[in-house]
C-alpha cells in the first residue's frame, strides 16, 4: 500500500504525527508492505522501518547544475527506498514519456524501487485506451532494462478517477481487465519471466468504501492512495482491509 501525500501536509509537525499513526498501525499488519511518500523536505525527518519511505519524484542525474532537482543517490542516502515516477500530475506539468523513462532508469540503477504511474485520460467505449496504455508503457520504460523489473511497480491510475470519491473509482472488473492488459504488454516487451516480477497497483479514489472490493476483485497487488492517505483513520482502515485479503 502506497501513500502519496502529494504537496501535503503543510508542516513537519503534522507530517510526523501522520507518519507515526501509520507506523503504529503497520506494526500490527501481517505481510502487507506499506510505503509512505511525503514531500522531499520531510523525508530526512521521518524514520523508515516497518513503513518504507518513498519520494514523489527523482531526477535522472545524480549531481550537478540542475537547480531544484533531487537525485536518486540523495534519496538513497536519506533512507528512501521507493520513488514514484511519472505521476499524472507531473506529466500534466510537462513531463514527457522520454523524461519519465530516463528518471525510471536512473532511479533503478541507483537501487531505488520505482513506482511507475500510467493511465489513460479518458475511455471512449471503443477500447482506444488499450492502445494508449500500450504506447505509454513502452515509451515510459524505453530506457529500462529487463534485469531491473524485479524492482519495478506499475501504478495504474486512470486520470478521470483521481481525486474523486469511492463511487468514481474504476470498477473492479475493469481494473482487472486493464491489469491483465498491462501484464501482457510488459510480457511482450520483456518476456513472461521478467514481467512476472512486476507488481501492479491501482490508484484513483481508493477509499475505505471500495478498497476491499478492489483488492478482492481488481487483480491488483495493492493501491496507490492519494487523498485518503492524509486521513490516518481511513488509511489505517484500508491497510487492515488489504492485510485481510
Ligand atoms: P487519489 O489520488 O487517491 O486522491 O485519487 C491517487 C493518486 O493521484 O495517486
Image (cartoon, rainbow, N blue to C red):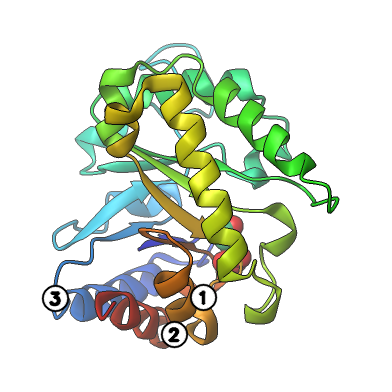
Q: Which mark is residue 228?
A: 1
Name the spot of residue 145 as percent of width and height, x first.
35, 15
Name the spot of residue 49 as percent of width and height, x first.
14, 59
Q: Is residue 157 left or right of residue 61?
A: right
Q: Residue at x 71, y 34 (%)?
A: 132
Q: Nearer the viewer, residue 123 or 163?
A: 123
Dividing the picture into quarters, in which one does residue 64 lie? Answer: top left
- Queried on whether the Cβ of the residue with tag 3 lies below 8 angstroms from ligand 1, the answer reads no
Residue that carries the numbered disc 2 in the rendered image: 234
Residue 230 at least partly seen: no
Residue that carries the numbered disc 3 in the rendered image: 27
Dot 1 falls on a residue whose secondary structure is: helix
- Queried on whether the Cβ of the residue with tag 1 lies below 8 angstroms from ligand 1, the answer reads yes
- Queried on whether the Cβ of the residue with tag 2 lies below 8 angstroms from ligand 1, the answer reads no
Q: Is residue 116 left or right of residue 1?
A: right
- Vertical placement of residue 11 versus 112, above or below: below
Q: Nearer the viewer, residue 164 or 202?
A: 202
Name the spot of residue 162 as percent of width and height, x first.
66, 62
Please say if the residues under marks 2 and 3 sit with CB atoms less than 8 Å apart.
Answer: no
Dot 3 falls on a residue whose secondary structure is: loop
Please say if the residues under marks 2 and 1 sit with CB atoms less than 8 Å apart.
Answer: yes
- Near mark 2 (Cα within 10 A), the count class, few <14, some 14-19 or many ≥20, is some
Q: Earlier in the sequence, mark 2 or mark 3?
A: 3
Name the spot of residue 217 as percent of width and height, x first.
46, 71
Quadrant in which the C terminus is drawn: bottom left
Mark 1 to mark 3 CA distance (whole Å): 20 Å
Q: Residue at x 52, y 66 (%)?
A: 10
Amino acid at each position: 500500500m502506497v501513500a502519496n501525500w502529494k504537496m501535503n501536509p503543510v508542516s513537519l509537525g503534522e507530517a510526523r504525527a501522520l507518519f507515526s499513526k501509520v507506523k503504529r498501525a503497520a506494526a500490527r499488519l501481517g505481510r502487507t508492505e506499506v510505503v509512505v511518500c511525503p514531500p522531499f523536505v520531510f523525508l530526512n525527518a521521518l524514520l523508515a522501518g516497518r513503513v518504507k519511505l518513498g519520494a514523489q519524484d527523482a531526477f535522472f542525474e545524480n549531481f550537478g547544475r540542475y537547480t531544484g532537482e533531487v537525485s536518486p543517490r540523495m534519496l538513497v542516502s536519506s533512507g528512501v527506498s521507493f520513488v514514484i515516477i511519472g505521476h499524472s500530475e507531473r506529466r500534466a506539468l510537462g513531463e514527457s514519456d522520454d523524461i519519465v523513462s530516463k528518471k525510471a532508469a536512473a532511479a533503478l540503477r541507483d537501487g531505488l524501487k520505482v513506482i511507475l504511474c500510467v493511465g489513460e485520460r479518458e475511455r471512449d467505449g471503443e477500447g482506444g485506451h488499450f492502445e494508449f496504455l500500450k504506447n505509454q508503457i513502452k515509451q515510459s520504460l524505453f530506457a529500462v532494462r529487463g534485469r531491473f523489473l524485479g524492482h519495478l511497480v506499475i501504478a495504474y491510475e486512470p486520470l478521470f478517477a483521481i481525486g474523486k470519491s469511492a463511487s468514481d473509482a474504476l470498477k473492479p472488473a475493469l481494473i482487472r481487465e486493464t491489469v491483465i492488459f498491462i501484464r501482457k504488454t510488459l510480457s511482450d516487451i520483456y518476456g513472461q519471466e521478467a514481467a512476472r516480477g512486476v507488481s501492479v497497483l491501482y490508484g484513483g479514489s481508493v477509499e475505505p468504501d471500495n478498497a476491499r472490493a478492489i483488492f478482492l476483485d481488481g487483480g491488483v497487488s495493492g493501491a496507490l492512495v492519494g487523498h485518503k492517505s492524509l486521513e490516518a483513520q481511513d488509511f489505517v482502515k484500508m491497510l487492515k482491509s488489504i492485510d485481510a485479503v
